[in-house]
Amino acid sequence: MDSVSIVAMASIITAGICMGIGAIGPGLGQGRAVQGALNAIAQQPDERNSLTRTLFVGLAMIESIAIYCFVISMILVFANPFWAYVVKKVGG
Amino acid sequence: MEVVAINQISPDQVIFFTWGFVTINATLVYTWLVMGILVVGSMVITRNLSTDRTLSRWQNLLEVIVGAIRSEIREVVKEGGDTYFPFIGTLFLFILFSNLFTFIPGYVAPTSSLTTTSALAIVVFFAVPIFGIAKQGVIEYLKEYFRPTFIFFPFHIMGEFSRTLALAVRLFGNLMSHEKVIAILLTVTPLFFPVVMQALGLLIGIIQAYIFAVLTMVYIASATQTHEEAEHKQKEH
C-alpha cells in the first residue's frame, strides 16, 4: 500500500470517527441543559425570557465543542495538510 | 454562482487579483462590503435625527437596536456600561450583518474565514486588559492574576489564551461548517433541504453574534470588577 492510499484512508476514517465520537458529549450535555431550563421555566414561568436567553447562550457554548470536532473533520477532508505533499512526492 | 468551491475551506483561498504583494481575496472584499454598508447606512440614517414623537422608520429601527444592546450590557455590568457600548455594539453589529447577508446570492460571510474571526478575537484579547487597566490601574489589574493563590498565575494566562482561541474557533466553525453543509447538501438534494438549512444558518448567525458580544461583555466585566466588588458579591449569596 503506497503512501497516497495510506494518507487518504487515514484522513477519511479519522474524519468520520472524530465527528462521530465528538458529537456524543455535546449531545448529552445539551439534553441536560434543556432539561434544566425546562424545569426552571416550569417552576417560574415569569422568568421565561431570561431563562430562554441563558439557555441559548449555554447551548451555544456546548455546541462549540462539537464544532471544534467538525472543524477538524472538515480540515482532514477538504484542507488536508499532508495531501499535497504526498501527491507531490508520488507524482514527482 | 459559487464563490468558494466545494473543495476550498475558506474564502481566503478565492483570490480576485494580485498586484505586487497585495492580494485581494474574497474575505477582504466582503469584509469591506459589510463595513461599507454599515457605515454608509448609519451615516444616511442619522443625518437628520429628530427628538419629537415622529421619527423616521429607520431612526426607530436604530433606536430599537441601540436600546436592546444597551439593556443587554446593563444586565452584565450594573453601571458604567456606556464606556463599553461602542465596542460591544460594533462587534455585535459587524458580526450580525456579516452573518445575515448570506441570503444574498453570491455573498460569502467574511466571518466564515478563520482570519476574520481571529482578528476579532485578538481585538477582544487586547481590549479586556485595556478596559481593566483603565478602570482599575495597572497594579490592581495585575494583582488579579495572582488572586486566589500565587500558583493560579499560569492558569489565568492559559485561560486568557484559550478564551480568545475559543471565541475565534466558535464563530469560524459555526459559519464555515454551515456553508460547507449547505454546499454538500446542494450536491445531494437540490431544493428543499438547502433552503431549510439556509434559514437555520440565519438563526445560527444571529445567535453566534449575540454569543460573541455577550462573552466579550462578560470577560470585560470580570476584568474590570475590583476585588472588593467580587468579595461583596460573594457575601451577598
Image (cartoon, coloured by chain):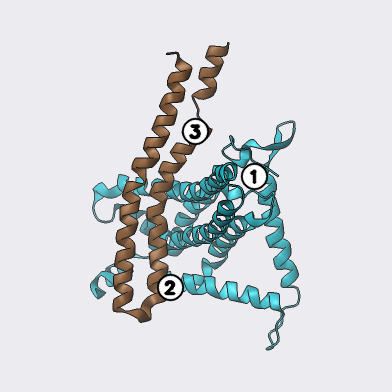
Chain colours: A brown, B cyan
Q: How far apart are the two marked residues, 3 and 2, measured between alpha carbons? A: 42 Å
The residue most toward the top is: A92
Q: How many marks?
A: 3
Quadrant location of residue B53? bottom right
Camera-side residue of B123 and A64? A64
Residues at discs 3 and 2 in contact (Cβ within 8 Å): no
Q: In the rendered structure, are the residues bearing label 3 and label 1 in contact, judged by CB atoms less than 8 Å apart?
A: no
> Which amino acid type is marked by label 2?
Glu
Residue B80 visible in this rendered orientation of the protein? no
- Res. B44 visible in picture: yes
Q: Position of residue B224 (x, y in %)?
A: 41, 63
Q: Earlier in the sequence, mark 2 or mark 1?
A: 1
Side (left or right) of B83 relative to B100: left
In the picture shown, does residue B233 fall above or below B224? below
For the residue pair B67 and B86, the one nearer the viewer reads as B67
Query: What secondary structure is marked by label 1?
Result: helix
- Tag 2 and tag 1 share a subunit: yes
Residue lying at the far bottom of the rendered structure: B53
Cα distance between the residues tagged 3 and 1: 22 Å
Residue that numbered label 2 is attached to: B75
Question: Residue B5 got which mark?
Answer: none
Query: What residue sits 53% from the left and 46% below the top?
Result: B181
Would you call the spot at circle 3 few (<14 residues within 10 Å), some (14-19), or many (20 or more)? many
Q: Chain of mark 2?
A: B
**Residue on which the image places disc 1:** B27
- Name the residue tied to disc 3: A77
The percent position of residue A54, horizontal first and vertical second, equals: 39, 67
